[in-house]
Amino acid sequence: MTDQNSEMTVPSLEMAERLLQQGETFLQAQFEAAIAADQRAMTMAAFFASVAAAIGAGAIAYWDKSGDLPILIAGLVGSGLMAIGACICLWAARPVDFFYPGTHPECWYSVLNRPLNEVLWGEAQNYQDNIEKNGTFLTQNSKALIYGASLSAVAPMVGIAAWLFFTAIYPSSPAVAALDGSRSPLFLDAYQHSSP
């Protein structure tokens, strides 16, 4: 309980029951939101991990056939960033100490002889503390999910930028050769005819 709450006057039984009901309702809503957020995070993590694996495998397969090093680097950079984003999304769905509505009956044993409005008021204050703690967890996990999804979303663009950069500094790549015509069928045909 916070100092501010402990200084407040104990409400009537009707008001204490209403406050407790509102606290339980809010905790239940937080719990449902947390489950939905975890499902969303797991779905996004699985999707991004699958796409990262496909990009990485495609880049390796293309490099194996063509020897195009810029494509390999770009594919590994893009898939690596997306895999990191998937891990962050997975982290957002990790188990945390979440507070649920309701209490164990044994928590009430020590206050069985106290007036019911005081006991319910104390429990409502406990609910408020739990709501605030749950809110902190939900905010942290939401931010992690946004960061992970954002990193995964920009990963293909970073991969394209890496491909452009390494193509510029590695001019013997198949992409550059295709652009200047040195590996085109006409160029090869002309080269074979001009050879002695």
Image (cartoon, rainbow, N blue to C red):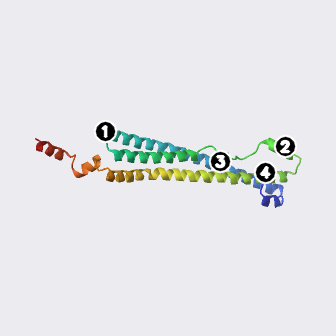
Task: Tell us which disc is closer to us: 1 or 4.
Answer: 1
Q: Looking at the picture, tell me which residue is in the foreground, 189 or 49.
A: 189
Q: Earlier in the sequence, mark 2 or mark 4?
A: 2
- Earlier in the chain: of badge 3 and badge 4, it is 3
Image marks 1 and 4: residues in contact by CB distance under 8 Å: no
Query: In what element is the residue under mark 2?
Result: helix
Q: Amino acid at mark 3?
A: Phe
Label 1 or label 4, whichever comes before in sequence order: 1
Residue highlighted by disc 2:
109
How packed is label 3: few (under 14 Cα within 10 Å), some, or many (20 or more)? some
Mark 4 and mark 2 in contact (Cβ < 8 Å)? Answer: no
Q: CA distance from mark 1 to mark 4?
A: 68 Å
Give the CA separation, mark 3 to mark 1.
51 Å
CA separation, marks 3 and 4?
Answer: 18 Å
Measure how far apart labels 1 and 2 are at the Cα level: 73 Å
The image shows a total of numbered marks equal to: 4
Separation of marks 2 and 4 at Cα, in angstroms? 13 Å
- Choose top left, top right, bottom left or bottom right for residue 53: top left
Q: Which residue is mark 1?
A: 65
Q: Does label 3 or label 1 sit earlier along the sequence?
A: 3
Task: Locate residue 65, reporting x and y percent.
Answer: 31, 39
